[in-house]
Image (cartoon, rainbow, N blue to C red):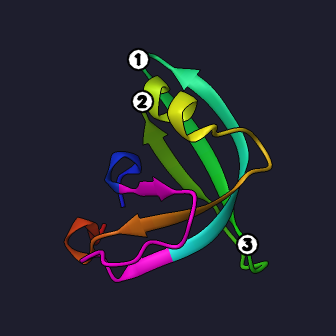
Amino acid sequence: IRAEDLLVALEAPRGLSARNVYEARIAWLGRTGADVTLRCVPARGAAGEWIVRVTPSAVASLGLVAGRGVFLAVKSHSVRVL
């Protein structure tokens, strides 16, 4: 799943066509060129992390900071087998 294919929400999404929604916590965020990269860890203690790329305006309007809980949504068509 490409970092730019993930959607970030502050609340559990409702009425959304994407069926894959995961609760996570932002562990780190930093500017990467024109975008901001988030490193998110699963909220329920599962191993691994999600890398998410968003715009600086999304960070500002959503109030995204390290430690904040979020929900990550991904469409199944965005999943690529490597």
| Relative image position of residue 48 (x, y in whole percent) | 66, 67
Mark before the other along the chain sequence, 1 or 3: 1
Q: Which residue is mark 1?
A: 34
Residue 17 located left or right of residue 59? left
**Which numbered disc covers residue 43?**
3
Which amino acid type corresponds to the residue marked 1 in the rendered image?
Answer: Ala
Query: To which quarter of the image does residue 57 belong?
Result: top left
Q: Is residue 56 left or right of residue 46?
A: left
Q: Earlier in the sequence, mark 3 or mark 2?
A: 3
Q: Earlier in the sequence, mark 2 or mark 1?
A: 1
Q: Position of residue 43 (x, y in %)?
A: 73, 72
Q: Does the residue at mark 2 contact the one at mark 1 (Cβ under 8 Å)?
A: yes
Q: Is residue 1 magenta?
A: no
The residues colored magenta run 6-21
Measure how far apart labels 2 and 1 are at the Cα level. Answer: 7 Å
Q: Where does label 2 land, which residue?
A: 55
The C terminus: image quadrant: bottom left
Amino acid type of the residue tagged 3 in the rendering: Ala
For the point 48% across and 54% down, the residue is: 8
Secondary structure mostly seen in the magenta stretch: loop
Given the current orientation, which residue lies at the most extreme top position?
33
The answer to whether 50 is drawn above or below residue 31 in the figure is below
Which image quarter: residue 1?
Answer: bottom left
Residue at position x 19%, y 72% in the image: 77
Q: Residue at x 65, y 55 (%)?
A: 40
Spatial separation of the CA atoms under disc 1 and disc 3: 28 Å
**In x, y percent, where is residue 52?**
49, 47
Classify 10 Å Cα crowding around label 1: few (below 14), some (14-19), many (20 and above). few
Q: Is residue 23 left or right of residue 3?
A: right
Disc 2 element = loop
